Image: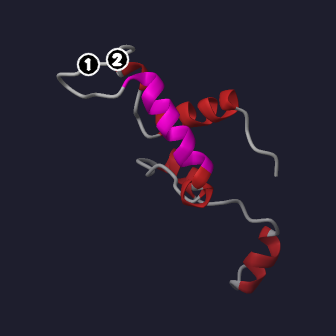
Amino acid sequence: MDSLSEEELDAYIRARLALAGFDLAKLPEEADPESGVPTRAQALASLRVFVASTPGALSSWTPPATDAAHAQQESAPLIYPSIDEARGGRQ
């Protein structure tokens, strides 16, 4: 598999953060030595390294479902649902 570009990683990171309810835009653009809060650029750089080194841990995480409309998003689709249903006794 080819590695993703920096822009693609940034888009992936922003999407995953949005799913988790975190807005990266809330981080400051300039460093604040008093609070020590990372800047947006620092956070993205750190997350790029993390995402590039631990894809398995990320691919298995899904946001918790709060209602029935979102519950179906938690389960991976079955490749052959008819075979799975037959094994479970449903026909």
Please tell me which residue is depicted at 67% across the width and 27% down the height of the picture.
7
Give x and y (percent) for residue 23.
Answer: 41, 26
Q: Nearer the viewer, residue 54 or 66?
A: 54
Please tell me which residue is depicted at 62% across the width and 30% down the height of the picture.
11
Q: Is residue 90 above or below residue 22?
A: below
Q: Is residue 85 left or right of residue 14?
A: right
Q: Which residue is mark 1?
A: 32
Mark 1 and mark 2 in contact (Cβ < 8 Å)? yes
Q: Is residue 53 above or below residue 91?
A: above
Please tell me which residue is depicted at 52% across the width and 56% down the height of the picture.
61
Quarter the C terminus occupies? bottom right
Residue 28 visible in the snapshot: yes
Q: Is residue 50 left or right of residue 22?
A: right
Give x and y (percent) for residue 25.
Answer: 42, 19
Residue farthest left in this picture: 34
Q: Secondary structure at mark 2?
A: loop
Q: Nearer the viewer, mark 2 or mark 1?
A: 1
Q: Secondary structure at mark 1?
A: loop
Tell me where the magenta segment starts and ends, as one range. Answer: 39-52
Q: Residues within 10 Å of mark 1 (few under 14, many from 20)?
A: few
Q: Is residue 47 left or right of residue 89?
A: left
Residue type highlighted by circle 2 = Pro
Residue type highlighted by circle 1 = Asp
Q: Is residue 79 left or right of residue 57?
A: right
Please tell me which residue is depicted at 76% across the width and 44% down the height of the picture.
3
Q: Nearer the viewer, residue 75 or 68?
A: 75
Quarter residue 58 falls in: bottom right
Q: CA distance from mark 2 to mark 1?
A: 8 Å
Give x and y (percent) for residue 46.
Answer: 48, 38
Residue 91 visible in the snapshot: no
Give x and y (percent) for residue 48.
Answer: 56, 39
Q: Which residue is mark 2?
A: 28
